Image (spheres, helix red, strand yellow):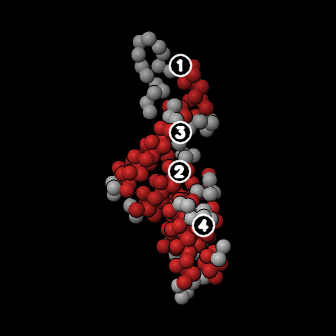
Amino acid sequence: MGKVIKLNASRPAVDEETRMKMRRFLENELTWAEVEGMTASQARQISRIGCDLAARGRLNDARIIFEGLVAGNPKDTSALAALGAVYQRLQRRAEALECFDKAVALFPANIIALANRGELRLRGGDAGGIEDLARAVEVDAKGVSAAGRRARTLLAALARSKPATQQARMAVGR
């Protein structure tokens, strides 16, 4: 980033194209990442770095990466879900839930956000987490993703537990 406003003697600080991009940003038509010219491919590469950092346990470094991606493009549901997962591992429950809520609101089939939010809600005593886990299983019916398989495993464990709710039993039967 940092491409928008460059001062040099040969051209004005802000050209007309940049003015238009900034106006569109202010009118919520563009994200800051789009103003800066960040491509989806570049965002994916940066996201991979964040995932690698998180996998190595460097959660604060991963948090910084994903916070930057979300700041640049608050509509990026993958970055929101990844940031939520990092917050979850950092025991920052409220921030994690906020990220998962935003990701699911923007893309209701985000398996990672659904599975993580479901688990987090259940750990907090919110039975609505069962619905999130059931939705994650429904979206990933073949169990292709790790998040979908985890959601299925959690639902099955809930259904087997003595005080299992009818809702959990029904969700496992889907």
Location of residue 127 with respect to 91 vertically, above or below: below
Q: Which residue is mark 4?
A: 137
Q: Residues within 10 Å of mark 4 (few under 14, many from 20)?
A: many
In the rendered structure, are the residues bearing label 2 and label 3 in contact, judged by CB atoms less than 8 Å apart? no
Tag 3's secondary structure? helix
Q: Earlier in the sequence, mark 4 or mark 2?
A: 2
Q: Which residue is mark 2?
A: 78
Q: Earlier in the sequence, mark 4 or mark 3?
A: 3
In the rendered structure, are the residues bearing label 3 and label 1 in contact, judged by CB atoms less than 8 Å apart? no
- Alpha carbons under labels 2 and 3: distance apart: 11 Å
Which residue appears at 56% of the width and 71% of the height? 152
- Alpha carbons under labels 1 and 2: distance apart: 33 Å
Q: Which residue is mark 3?
A: 40
- Alpha carbons under labels 4 and 3: distance apart: 27 Å
Residue 104 placement: quadrant? bottom right
Q: Amino acid at mark 1?
A: Asp
Q: Residues within 10 Å of mark 3 (few under 14, many from 20)?
A: few
In the rendered structure, are the residues bearing label 4 and label 3 in contact, judged by CB atoms less than 8 Å apart? no
Q: Amino acid at mark 3?
A: Ala
**Which mark is on residue 15?**
1
